[in-house]
Amino acid sequence: EEYAKNLGTKPSRPQIDFHFYPIALDRYITVDTSSVDSLNYQHFESVINLIKQYDPSIKFVDITEGREKGLEYFDKSLLGKCSYRHISYVISKAELHLCVDTFSSYIASVFDVPTVCLYGPMHPENSKPIWSEKLVCLFDCPPDVKPSYSGKDPNSIINLVSPEKVARECLSLI
């Protein structure tokens, strides 16, 4: 993708091979919280609670890789239960994908799943997915602070995005 952008061309949409996974939920939002320090958004629980106030029928599915234990505020956790192909299937059937800047945002983009993606250590223009029109990138870095471009962000820029703003953007897409 980066190579094509540098040449001034647009890469074609990739094809992702996925495998069926029995999710057994009618309406759900997939959430990828990341296990990387600089992408650790501390307000996911607040966002989920805000969305559930407006639409209690929506369930939340945790698809985060690299964490040993699921978080209590998810309706379903797929930690350690799925391959990447299963995760791709689950994302492809979601009403919305909520994530930090991880591989799952690209998967959602390929399947044209509405996505709200949070950025902290890196500016969205450097790494946002390019295949979806239904993408909202949230990055609230103050002008006097530079993104760290690191796994350890001393300013925790990602946490400057308010949970109300995230919930509002999610609700606008579903």
Image (tube, helix red, strand yellow):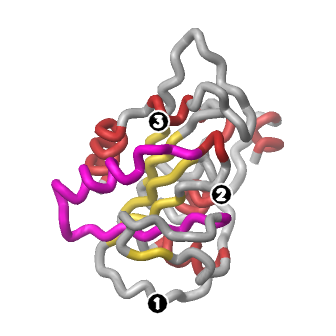
Residue 17, x across and y down, in percent:
66, 78
Mark carried by residue 140: none
- Residue indicated by mark 2: 103
- Residue indicated by mark 3: 138
Residue at 16% over, 55% down: 54
Q: Which element carries disc 2, helix, strand or loop?
A: helix
Q: Nearer the viewer, residue 38 or 166?
A: 38
Asked if the stretch drawn in magenta spans residue 87, the answer is no
Q: Are marks 2 and 1 in contact (CB under 8 Å)?
A: no
Q: Is residue 44 left or right of residue 169?
A: right
Rendered position, 159 above or below 143? below
Residue 58, x across and y down, in percent:
26, 68
Picture quarter containing residue 34?
A: bottom right
Q: Which residues are magenta?
A: 40-66
- The answer for how far apart the CA atoms under marks 2 and 1 are is 22 Å
Q: Which amino acid does the dot numbered 3 rest on?
A: Leu
First-in-chain label (2 vs 1): 1
Q: Is residue 110 left or right of residue 12?
A: left
Residue 4, x across and y down, in percent:
78, 43
Q: Is residue 117 left or right of residue 75?
A: right
Give the quadrant of the C terminus: bottom left
Residue at 48% over, 35% down: 159
- Residue indicated by mark 1: 22
